[in-house]
Amino acid sequence: MTIDDPIVTKGNSPATLLDPRESMRRLPVHWQTPLTMLTGKPYDGQPAIRLSVTHHVAGCCASMGLGVGVTALALWLGTWWIVSAMVGMAVTLHGMRNARMMVFHQAAHKNLYRRERLDAAIGRACSAILLVQNFSQYRREHTSEHHSRHHMTLRDPTVQAFLIGLGLTPGMTRRQMWRRMLRKVLSPAFQLRFAISRLCSFWIGADTPERAIALGFYGSAIFLSVATGSWEVFVIGWLVPLFPLFQIVNTLRLCVKHTFPAPGNENIAGKERMAALTNAIFLGEATPARGQGAIRATVAWTRWCGRMVFVHAPARYLVLTGDTVCHDFHHRYPRHKAWFDYISEREIDSHTTGSGWPEYTQVWGLAQAISHVFDSLARADSSVFDRTRIEGISSRALFTAFDD
């Protein structure tokens, strides 16, 4: 990752260098749907890509199962097992993150299948299997503190995670924030505290069904691992993605969720406030310019393909999973009926007039989006975002904020 200056654009600016997606229209037509899913943005006028709730629910379950299976096969074959196991762990992690960031999240909004009892049952299963904050508490706190007038104030768990969990404060430089954040996520002590706090945030307050699911799932997994002598599959294939890898990408995701209000704008309310504090994060970069010589064009296209495959695709697949690329759309419409078609629906809404919402804002690139958030914190009012004013926050509550 780099700390390059982010390019932030508003509204729709097709056919300009500020919209890398438009430059990709020159690529073959059968590439366009995959490119839209990777970048998080369709080209101007692209037909809508329609998915479904079940597509996301079944997809995350299939991804977790497939990932564990690939890891098990890699360990059994032995040859090149490290590379294959890494692929398996990545697939498992992808499924876990989609289960957390879309299925669990939408269930908390009573918006998954829009059937409260079914959504609650699925939400409890997610919290029990992923060992994140128990569903009832998360649903209550998420709607009352994060989706409310307390959004991006000292009462918001996201702000608490920045100021106390990561130790970032207004006035720090972008580079200082990057260094501190990276030291945190790579620190074994931080990872251990995070894991313990996750377990506590699940167990304390969990209801009987949640605890029963967790005990049944992990009890069965441990029993089968011991009985079949395949404990390494459980550890490498499940626990490694579930704890250290999950927590690393979770922290990176935290760092792009929302920007801090500019000094003097802390009391702005309503649609203007919500739009100003959330932006989309699209992934990708403009294709090479036309008219280059054969050698330069070959180098440029090789670099473009390499960055799309090895930089932007992993960022999309592991960090900005599911609808997190369009998180601004969710904050404008928390219970949108077609949330599962997040890319197409955001694009349609961005061309809709008369809604009363300001223009959408977007940043291209994960690292650039993190820098954008860090810059907003650097400029924030230190008297407003004073960590000493955060009272009564426990270690469990703090690391729950990382999992918001």
Image (cartoon, helix red, strand yellow):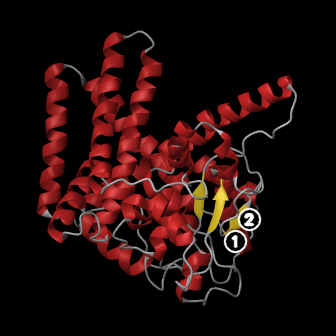
Percent x, y of residue 14? 69, 59
* x and y, in percent, of residue 136 in the image: 24, 69
Most foreground residue, 371 or 330: 330
Whether the residues at callouts 1 and 2 have beta carbons within 8 Å, the answer is yes
Identity of the residue drawn at 12% across and 45% down: 216
Crowd around label 2: few <14 · some 14–19 · many ≥20 (10 Å): some
Which quarter of the image is occupied by the N terminus? top right
> What is the quadrant of the C terminus in the image?
bottom left
Residue designated by label 1: 170
Q: What residue sits 73% from the left and 56% below the top?
A: 15
Q: At numbered mark 2, what does the secondary structure look like: helix, strand or loop?
A: loop
Left or right position of 129 against 403: left
> Which residue is identified by label 2?
172
Q: Is residue 288 above or below residue 392?
A: above
Q: CA distance from mark 1 to mark 2?
A: 6 Å
Side of 378 where 81 appears, left or right: left
- Residue type at mark 1? Pro
Q: Is residue 189 visible?
A: no
Task: Give the percent coordinates (x, y) of residue 32.
Answer: 55, 43
What secondary structure is found at the residue carrying circle 1?
loop
Q: Position of residue 221 (x, y in %)?
A: 19, 35
